Amino acid sequence: MILITGGTGFIGSHTAVVLQQAGYDVLVIDNLHNSEREVISAIGQITGREPAFIEGDIRDVSLLAGLFKTHHIQAVMHFAGLKAVGESTQIPLTYYDNNIQGSITLLQAMRNAGVRTFVFSSSATVYGDPQRLPLTEDHPRSATNPYGYTKLVIEDILESLYRSEPGWKIARLRYFNPVGAHPSGLIGESPQGIPNNLMPFIAQVATGQRKQLNIFGNDYDTPDGTGVRDYIHVMDLAEGHKTALEYCNAQAQTLLTTNLGTGQGYSVLEMIQAYEQACGKPIAYQVAERRPGDIAACWADTTYAKQTLGWKADLGLKEMCQDGWRWASRDNTGQQKRGQDSFNTD
Ligand code: NAD
Ligand code: UFG
């Protein structure tokens, strides 16, 4: 059985689908801070069986001890965490406690139970402001905000753990910009309040929940002046996790650190255009100030992932936007209610 922390969240839920469809048994633990229990039944609808689910917090020592005792867990995929860069600058202690302390508690429970296979959600944020592109895994790391710092620290904790005793099989997966949704339209990304990220914001302009998109700067040193990112379909990312798990399982011990991206950068204007094609409506936008802390451009070198895992992203911008739009435009009253709670035409 594979334990997925944060498994009702965006990336964890898609990975749960891929793992179940590959024949793995999945146990999800999530405190539902940023997701909903209904995701479990949606995973059941897609795959034909619901994963086991425990509502709880990864910082709960006795809950974790009990969970490792009562289930035959072979590996842990660790998605649970807080991820809003802006919020992390306002409540850093909460981020350090949830992300760093949460990871330590989880790793201690694994160690006590003799479970040593761990797949971790790291981020391209660990590269800081890129000194060169595309980003290779040996690019110097840095952090400019508490969220990014938690990823650096957890990466380092995993390295010391790997070196401390034999048998650990650890994958540190550095995601670029995950977007899109499962093609069924049954699971996807559900940001609460005003979306921080580009794609969910564009989606809410398309559904009429927001009046227009603010483009954060059009004077960057990029072909059209807007920020360039490596957007990756969440289903490709989920497949990448399954491949990383299988890679770990095949080693006696390993500390794998790899990018998961497409290697292709798209600008904000290109994303708007592609989304307009997918939803068949114009996306209203205005150019606003640069967002503090943003970088001009970022995309992955995908060579190492191809070499080690034999994995590469298959889905393009069209699928990212079509699948994202299918999810965003679904008839889901719960989601609409939440959207109204936070209605804002900024
Ligand atoms: P998400 O918020 O949709 O999912 C995270 C899940 O973890 C949520 O369901 C939340 O309720 C749960 N959670 C948070 N703290 C918890 C705790 N202490 N105990 C139990 N459950 C807890 O986020 P996501 O986009 O799916 O991201 C998953 C992971 O990937 C995160 O670690 C994030 O930092 C990382 N990541 C995300 C992105 C991105 O752009 N989405 C990019 C790079 C890395
Ligand atoms: N953007 C806008 N308007 C918006 C939102 C975003 O113009 O309303 C622009 C940004 O300036 C940037 C691009 O769209 O140029 C992408 O922005 P996102 O916020 O979607 O993504 P980021 O690359 O800034 O950050 C994301 C995650 C971080 C993670 C990082 C690297 O939010 O947590 O990718 O993996 F660290």
Image (cartoon, grey):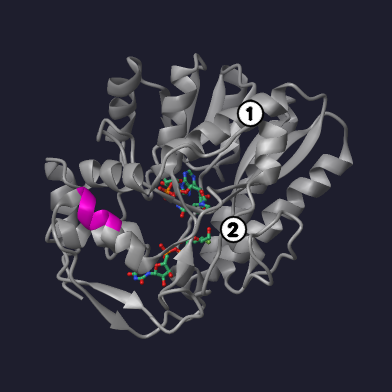
Residue 277 located within the stretch drawn in magenta: yes
Q: Which residues are magenta?
A: 274-278
Around disc 2, counting alpha carbons within 10 Å, would you say few (fewer than 14), some (14 to 19), or many (20 or more)? Answer: many
How many residues crowd mark 1 within 10 Å: few (<14), some (14–19), many (20+)? Answer: many
Q: Residue at x 72, y 54 (%)?
A: 137
Quick check: 130 above or below 314? below
Query: Which residue is under mark 1?
Result: 245
Amino acid of disc 1 = Leu
Q: Is mark 2 within 8 Å of ligand 2?
A: yes
Which residue is pictured at 41% across the width and 82% down the height? 290
Q: Position of residue 81 (x, y in %)?
A: 51, 51
Provide the secondary structure element on which disc 1 rests. Answer: helix
Residue 95 belongs to magenta span = no
Image quadrant in which you'd find residue 166: top right
Q: Is residue 36 left or right of residue 81?
A: left
Q: CA distance from mark 2 to mark 1?
A: 20 Å
Count of marks placed on residues: 2
Q: Residue at x 58, y 62 (%)?
A: 125
Residue drawn at point x = 37 percent, y = 62 percent? 197
- Residue 66 appears anywhere in the view: no
Amino acid type, label 2 = Ala
* 7 versus 196 height, above or below: above
Q: Specify the label residue 269 is tagged with.
A: none
Lateral position of residue 340 relative to residue 195, left or right: left
Query: Is the CB of the residue bearing disc 1 within 8 angstroms of ligand 1?
Result: no
Q: Residue 124: give its label.
A: 2
Q: Position of residue 267 (x, y in %)?
A: 41, 66
Q: Which quadrant is the C terminus positioned in?
A: bottom left
Relative image position of residue 134 (x, y in whole percent) = 63, 60
Residue closer to the observer: 248 or 337: 248
